[in-house]
Each structure stands twice: as C-alpha cells, then as structure tokens.
Image (cartoon, rainbow, N blue to C red):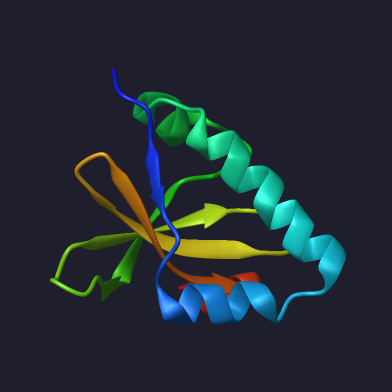
Amino acid sequence: MSLVVLDLNNPAFLNDWFQLEKAEAMAVLDTLRKIRGMEWDLVYRDRGLRWETIISRKGPAGQRIYSLRITRMVRATTYRDGEYLRFLSLHPDQDSAY
C-alpha cells in the first residue's frame, strides 16, 4: 500500500486555514502531519478522521468529494486523485462541509 501525498495548494483551503485562530490552525497542521504518514487504507478506517462521502457535492472534475474531521471543531472537504489527497476547503462550522 502507498502513503498519502497531500495537496494543500487550493486557494480556498489556504484562505480558510489562514483565517483560523492560531491554536486551531496548529491543530490542523498536526492532523495533516498525521495523514501524511498514513497509508490510504488507514485513512479510510481511522475513527478520528471520520472519512465520509459527501453525496450533495462534486469535485472540480465531477469526482466524489469527502469530508474529514481535521480537529474537534473543523472538517475539511477533499477528494482523492491517485495517491494525492487534494484539499478543497476547511469548515469551522462542521455542518457547512456538507
């Protein structure tokens, strides 16, 4: 199995991240470090991340979008592109991810 490669270059994701309070932004960084060292099958099964499909939305090229719990207060929207986990946005109000 291969390790997850993170793509954090989406402008909306970066804008969301930079607007968080310092402690919450650092907690996001801690989770990203955790994910970076994981294999894909572990990401899917990790109970802390709570990988969930978002049925109501599609990615930039029509691909399936997922929600991950990044911190206790923040969820991220992402999609898988081969070995890359591409981040789209962060949602301090967790319900807004859906």
Q: Is residue 52 positioned above or below 16 on the image?
A: above
Left or right of 86? Residue 59 is: left
Q: Residue at image x 40%, y 72%?
A: 10
Count numbered badges in the picture: 0
Q: Can residue 30 be seen in this view?
A: yes
User: What quarter of the picture does the C terminus occupy?
Assistant: bottom left
Q: Is residue 71 visible?
A: no
Q: Is residue 3 positioned above or below 7 on the image?
A: above
Quarter-wise, where is residue 4 in the image?
Answer: top left
Q: Residue at image x 51%, y 28%?
A: 37
Residue 28 in the image, given as x and y percentages of width and height: 68, 56
Q: Residue furthest top?
A: 1
Left or right of 82? Residue 43 is: right
User: What quarter of the picture does the N terminus occupy?
Assistant: top left
Residue 33 in the image, given as x and y percentages of width and height: 60, 40
Residue 77 in the image, given as x and y percentages of width and height: 44, 65
